[in-house]
Image: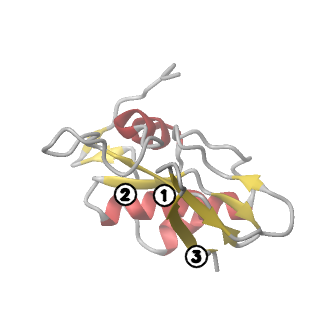
Amino acid sequence: MPKYGKIYYGETEKGEFVTVEGFIDGKFVKYTNNNGALCVDESEILGQKAQCLSHFSYEKSTRKVMILDVQGSGYQLFDPEIASTELFDEDDHVLYCAGNLSKEAVERFTSMHKCNNFCKAIGLTPLQIYDGIQAPTFTNIY
């Protein structure tokens, strides 16, 4: 089962904020990018599970946020990003962090993702369908 390790947050003596994660041994693989791109062949099982995680997060948040930048070694994942459909809060602060590529990342992922057996097994709605309407195809976002 995929899992994320603990992340520690701190501040340097110069007032800079940092996050620190433990070392993960093994081969590093990026399954999805924070821009919504799919990074491995669709036949790769861990890549399918990573895409299912992104799809699940989007559906369960009522299409407001998506976990992207899914990467790690085997089932040990680290350094995710959140893409939100709204980039700014009511005070014009960027939501989540600078890695939030917002609607562009969500649109890219939803246009590229094809539901796999994991999406189907947990009953996710295909992303290409929004309220019964075929989703537009996005090209050349980057």
Q: Position of residue 17 (x, y in %)?
A: 49, 53
Other residues around mark 2 within 10 Å, as few (<14) / some (14–19) / many (≥20): many
In-front residue for pair 69/40: 69
CB atoms of marks 3 and 1 within 8 Å: no
User: Considering only vertical position in the picture, is 124 above or below 114?
Assistant: below
Q: Amino acid at mark 2?
A: Tyr
CB of mark 2 within 8 Å of CB of mark 3? no
Amino acid residing under circle 1: Ser
Check disc 2 and report its element: helix, strand or loop: helix
Q: Nearer the viewer, mark 2 or mark 3?
A: 3
Q: Quadrant of the N terminus?
A: bottom right
Q: Residue placed farthest to the front in the image?
A: 13
Where is residue 140? Give x, y as percent: 51, 19
Tell me the crowding category of disc 1: few under 14, some 14 to 19, or many 20 or more residues within 10 angstroms, Cα based: many
Residue for badge 2: 58
**Residue beneath label 1, please?**
54
Q: x, y (%) of residue 65?
A: 34, 54
Q: Left or right: 58 with respect to 9?
A: left
Work out whether residue 74 or residue 13 is closer to the camera in this orientation and state it. Answer: 13
Q: Residue at x 56, y 70 (%)?
A: 7
Residue 97, label in figure: none
Percent position of residue 49, x then y: 61, 65
Q: Secondary structure at mark 3?
A: loop
Farthest residue in the bottom direction? 1
- Point 58% across, 66% down: residue: 117
Q: Name above or below for residue 6 compared with residue 43.
A: below
Q: Which residue is label 3 attached to?
A: 6
Of callouts 2 and 3, which one flags the residue occurring earlier in the amino acid sequence? 3
